[in-house]
Amino acid sequence: MTTPPTEEKPARKSAWKRWVYVILIVIVLLALLVWRQRSTGRPMMARGAKAPPTALPVVVHTAALGDIDIYLDGLGTVTPLATVTLRTQISGQLTKVAFTEGQMVEKGAVLATIDPRPYQAALEQYQGQLRQAQAQLAEARIDLSRYETLSEQDSIAKQQVDSARALVTQYEGLVQTGQANVDSAKLNLAYCQVIAPVAGRVGLRMVDEGNYVTPGDANGLVVLTRVKPITVIFTVPEQQMLAVASRLHSGATIPVEAFDQNQTRKLAGGTLSAIDNQVDTTTGTFRLRAVFANEDESLFPNQFVNVRMLLDTQHNVIVIPTAGIERNQLGTFVYIVKPDNTVAIHPVTLGTTEGEHVAIASGLKVGERVVVDGADRLTDGVPVTVQAEK
């Protein structure tokens, strides 16, 4: 006789409850998954399906027509129009220095004085000799006139008249010599004052008052430099010589700007005045001279400067920022944003570059949108979102 299975029914009921709980948990998880997908707006994807590519944010610039300047850059040295080492024309004691070091002086200003007394005495001596010769000449002319009258009357010999005429000629020579000595003495007396031949700035004096100076002094008295206006001599490659010469000979005014050594600060603006008559074969460059008013004296003689010359201006060309230019092994290209907000690669040929802008010779049309920021992750056909337009 078998006993009834009293414990089998509770065990079955317990297993059934566990399965019910598992099924409920699965249903809840599926419901949560469906709710999450609906709330994010993403459709459910089948296993193995790839997510659509995410649109990348970019900044674009619309290509348009504009003007772009053609500049030539060069290295230059500030060169004065006149640099004069003032030396004495005579020997003597320097009695006065009439300038302050670094002073601006006008043309004709007296800069120094040399003791004039010896030269004043020489002048007076020569003037006395001249007056003596003039008196002798006057007397000889009177005698000649008298002898000529007597000769016409056959009262004296002709030889006596000829002697009187020769004596007049001799005294005329003495007068001419005396006048030359007087003029020379006056010139030496004028040389006692050292005069500024040009307007400019004087440097440091080389000789102090009281010294004996001579024309053979190597250093002179002082150096005078004309700084207003002033010039810059700079070089550009010989390949640009024809373009520069044609522009200059046409009568056009070619602006030139001078910058400091770091090319961060503009020092002055001027115009091109002349080009050299030959090319330097050792460097393959030719020299040009530009003139600057230099009213604020920002350019200093022998100063090194960077020069930028505006040679010409191109009008009505397609201009975009240089930030939009990309490069690979095949050349230069840009990313174009198409109407469906995807990008396409367009190879382009570059023209003249001016600062942060570049002219496009070919490969781009007016109105096309070029990516200028955010191109580092782009590839052909990638969707983008335009965040801003420059």
Image: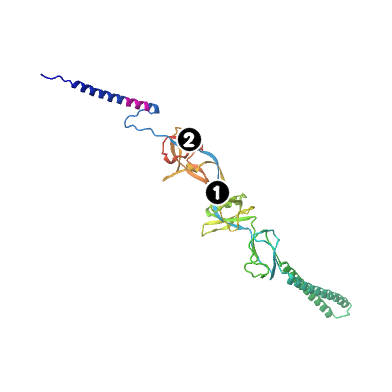
State the image coordinates of residue 386 (x, y, percent, origin top left): 47, 35
Q: Residues within 10 Å of mark 2 (few under 14, many from 20)?
A: few
Residue 17 percent coordinates (x, y): 25, 23
Does the magenta run of residues contain 270? Answer: no
Secondary structure of the residue carrying tag 1 is strand
What's the mark number on residue 387?
Answer: 2
- Where is residue 19? Give x, y as percent: 25, 24
Mark 1 is on which residue type? Tyr
Q: Is residue 71 visible to us here? A: yes
Say whether residue 285 is left or right of residue 291: left
Judging depth in this view, the residue of 298 and 375 nearest the camera is 298
Q: Are marks 2 and 1 in contact (CB under 8 Å)?
A: no
63 relative to 105, above or below = above
Q: Is residue 29 shown in magenta?
A: yes
Picture quadrant of residue 1: top left
Q: Which residues are magenta?
A: 28-36
Which disc number belongs to residue 71?
Answer: 1
User: Does residue 167 appear to the left or right of 271 in the view shown?
Assistant: right
- Secondary structure beneath label 2: strand
